[in-house]
Amino acid sequence: MAALGWLTPRRRSATARSVLAGEASAEAARKSSQEASGTTEEPQFPVHGDDQAAAFFDLDNTVMQGAALFHFGRGLYKRKFFETRDLAKFAWQQAWFRLAGVEDPEHMQEARDSALSIVKGHRVAELQSIGEEIYDEYMAERIWPGTRALAEAHLDAGQKVWLVTAAPVEIAQVIARRLGLTGALGTVAESVDGVYTGKLVGEPLHGPAKAEAVRALAAAEGLDLTRCAAYSDSHNDIPMLSLVGHPYAINPDSKLRRHARELDWRLRDYRTGRKAAKVGIPAAAGVGAVAGGTAAAIALHRRRR
């Protein structure tokens, strides 16, 4: 039997150097496998317990499909706040926004002016209450699940999450509350004694104004912007995205996609359809639905003239 002793496995205690060698070999094998399959693992983010980090999310076409102001307008039309011709204008602006995949400054200004004229004379509390109903009717089903998951990851990590949008702050606050987010930065409409005057306080929270709002909030909250994240679909938000250490391009328009690739920013595209991913527009079915709705609204208006 002694002659067969060499067949019996020998147990030897691992030295520190042998453990290190084994771990290094396993790590090298894992990295090689990931690189070969193109699935290199990213560092854990967001970082749990980092109370100097937060996340800032654009709203339109980043968190929610389409423009919040348009959906709000649909709800107000249903409640007879304005006439059919105004709905047709809202519908056309929304169709342009979705087909082009970018924010047109002229259309956005027209939409804001229309909204301000519509709410003039109404109480802020009334619009806030109606906003809750409109969220359930038109907005809840248009939240991008992928973007919502990103926001929830920040919340789970113990970080605050804000919406940052050119939409009226009352709408933004409703959406933030329904999604369980910390709060919202939005365009502020002037009110006196709780009644809208039809004017803005300052200018719309758009482009560079968003970056200034994020900078001011970060200072007030004691945040380190290099540890914060920002998410947007639009090249108009490059100033905001450039402020933080972790910028994300979500469902990006062509200009933002190009900029993000040049700077090696992370990209996420939650739109369906190969064409949508390539040229930055919604899937054909979605476009058809909006275009059909636009045509129906215009046709209805013509019949009533």
Image (cartoon, rainbow, N blue to C red):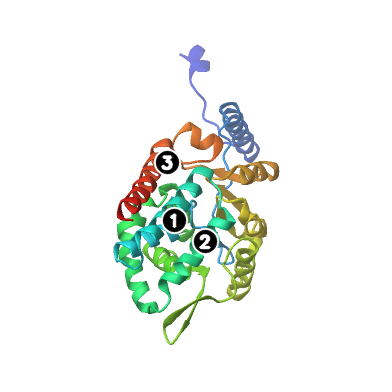
Q: Residue 155, image x and y in percent? A: 46, 60
Name the amino acid type tagged 1.
Lys
Question: Is there a contact, CB below 8 Å, between mark 2 and mark 1?
Answer: yes
Asked which secondary structure carries label 2, the reply is helix
Q: CA distance from mark 2 to mark 1?
A: 9 Å
Tell which circle, 2 or 1, labels the residue nearer the N-terminal end.
1
The quarter of the displayed image where residue 13 is located: top right
Instruction: Report the mark closest to the observer, 3 or 2.
Output: 2
In the displayed structure, would residue 52 be above or below residue 41? Answer: below
Q: CA distance from mark 3 to mark 2?
A: 21 Å
Q: As drawn, which residue projects farthest toward the right?
A: 262
Left/right of residue 243 with respect to residue 12 in the rendered view: right
Name the amino acid type tagged 2.
Glu
Q: CA distance from mark 1 to mark 3?
A: 17 Å
Q: Which residue bears the numbered disc 2?
A: 110
Q: Which mark is residue 89?
A: 1
In the displayed structure, would residue 177 be above or below residue 242? Answer: below
